[in-house]
Amino acid sequence: MPKTEAKISGARLMVELLEEYGVDIVFGYPGGAILPFYDELYKSTKIKHILVRHEQGAIHMAEGYARSTGKLGVCIATSGPGATNLVTGLTDAKLDSVPILAITGQVATNAIGTDAFQEADIYGITIPITKYNALIKSADDIARHFQEATLVALGGRPGPVLLDFPKDVQTELTSVRKVDKLKIDSRHYQKPPIGGDLDSFAAALNKAKRPLLYVGGGAINANASKEIRELAEKGNIPVTTTLMGIGAFPGTHQLSVGMLGMHGTAYANKAVLECDYILNLGARFDDRVAKPGEFAENAIRAHIDIDTAEFNKRVSVDYLLHGDLKEVLKALIPKVNKVDRPEWVGFLDTLKKNHPLEFDDSTDTIKPQGFLQKLYEKSKGKAIVSTDVGQHQMWAAQYYLFEEANRWLTSGGLGTMGYGLPAAIGAKFGNPKNTVICVSGDGSIQMNIQELATIAMYKKGVKILIFNNNFLGMVRQWQELFYEERFSESEWNYNPDFVKLGEAYSIKGLRISNKSEIDKALEFFLEDDDARILEVMIPAEEKVFPMIPAGKSQKDMIEFSDTVRAGKK
Amino acid sequence: MKHILKILVNNHPGVMSHVSGLFTRRSYNIDSIAVGVTQDSEISNMVIVVKGDDSVVEQVKRQLLKLPDVIEVEDLAYHDCISRELVLVVVKVEDSNRTEIISICEVFQAKIADLTKTTMTIEFSGNTRQVEHFLEMMQKYGIQEIARTGQIALKYRST
Ligand SMILES: Cc1ncc(C[n+]2csc(CCOP(=O)(O)OP(=O)(O)O)c2C)c(N)n1
């Protein structure tokens, strides 16, 4: 029987449950349909509410917070337009497996389905983009839905959940504060047992001459960095990571070959071609990395994942193990032989020397690659870095190395412009002592630039780096390479004065355009814990290399030196 | 290849969209879908028939199991399940062929559910092949309207 206690309102119960779960920060924006909840939040001493300027900002902040802390990220919006503003963020969190709880207000139950003022069927809208969602019809159901939702968000492969909360349910009284029995199966929140044959899996790995680890975002979610390092060092197995896996293995480690895929390093992509065994650890053979039928076609392919739906989804594998990556690796490592692989490791070292990341640094203009190298040195590779989407994102992935997980925040699956700034703010709330840098472009930054106000209001020392090429740079790059330089709608000749814009929010800024100014600018940028805007003017024609054209495979990679030879750099 | 998926789900509104959404996402055409409550009123049984290659159906099956409201998914092979579909069909009748149609119905054990001067509404249930066959027989008289339920299925029990 449910434990009977004095009755409280649905809204009060939601706040108490959030407190009980240790949620101490939420990001949101109020409105009519969620007012009873906000009224209860007002009374809470444990939960800090961060008022944003756009609900998309709220959910990306929750994502930045979740990804940098490993905790649940919570965001709040009102019904209708507030709720629909969360849609991009929910999709982003779904594709990148980020644990998010979104709470939305909804019109009163008797008005649902009538096209009432500010009504949107957010439950229906978010079915394909959440791991779990529910329209709560009675205050008596709140405790159960809340528990199910949070367990699902954090359990297994994490993801976003949404609870839609009609206004009358918020004011309805209930005495059901605890859950007797969950309706969902425990497989949705308990760690699965290890599935598959560890021995044959290990035996195949032990037979390999040129093995390679291919590490994805799942490794970070599973907190498996230590085990991956152990496995790599024990078997002397080189490691490449996906965009999402950056930081799961130290970027400076001798066995690291950096990122693979569309804009991965030449040596990582060549390693994929040369290896005879590739072990996927929590990655998903994403289409920016793997072309079905051609990916590591000469290698034995193996896969460890917590999500069985990822097995043989795009690329078929020879061996698979199901389970929590950390647990599986713990069981696997003792079965893996300790071996030196001087030839294979030496071969990759030579590749690294002969095919380094390259750019033309012969002019006085600032090259983003060189700038990011300097930023990496100056911040000692310790910063939490968020990015937006475009060339700057890829340069940051290539040139800023990470020693640890949870310090690289980027929208990998959805490629969401506008993610960077709010994600950085969320990360700063979660990690007040860390330097947090948002690397953005002049296009992306304008997608959620209103959140500068949130930075100013809460005095959050987020460092904002804007590479300004007066172009939607990545679009331009594709148009240059694949559309005969027809720059359809990718050039802008109007940007705001970003420095002055910052000043309008009392954020100090600086603009530089000459290489000689870099050192001073970086000093200004990183000198204290205040927010800063640094606008770096860069040439529009600068491109990201290497590049594997969309839909092609590792064999078709274009390197910087290829373009120099062709007289097209 | 045809697959009959038997899916046990929590009996909530919206679960149907969650489930069918997984098929539409992969632009998969559902041949038929039938839903009904089970002996436990909290749980519904969905039977979905799809054509598709095995690996994609396997994928969808695993995606289905990720939905919190999905309790169990089983891919029933045709030979080890009993499947039924109910069809109501309206055919044109004339004085000259009325007895002929009635005798065909007798052979098929189909029921005549309604009769007018010019039409006959017939109720027939059987597996998909039998339903197809029956409708083929009726074709010749002129079918005016059809309503089909979609397949339901259960596994054969072994004793
Ligand atoms: C919301 C959204 N709209 C459109 C795109 C397509 N897109 C990808 S990269 C890019 C250009 C980004 O330009 P900018 O932010 O200036 O960065 P740059 O590539 O110049 O570094 C665009 C438009 C996207 N990823 N996200």
Image (cartoon, rainbow, N blue to C red):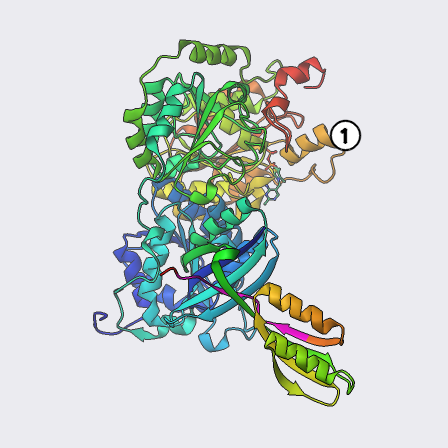
Q: Residue at x 60, y 38 (%)?
A: A497
Q: In x, y percent, where is residue A480?
A: 71, 29
Please tell me which residue lies in front, A382 or A147.
Answer: A147
Secondary structure under badge 1?
A: loop
Q: Quadrant of residue B104?
A: bottom right
Q: In x, y percent, where is residue A86?
A: 50, 55
Q: In x, y percent, where is residue B56?
A: 55, 46
Residue B152 lies in the magenta-colored region: yes
Figure quadrant, ligand 1: top right
Q: Which residue carries the number 1 mark? A: A484
Q: How many marks?
A: 1
Magenta residues, start to end: B146-157
Query: Does the beta carbon at disc 1 come under 8 Å from ligand 1?
Result: no
Q: Quadrant of residue A135?
A: bottom left
- Quadrant of the drawing holding the C terminus of chain B: bottom left
Label 1: few (<14), some or many (≥20) within 10 Å?
few
- The chain ID associated with circle 1 is A
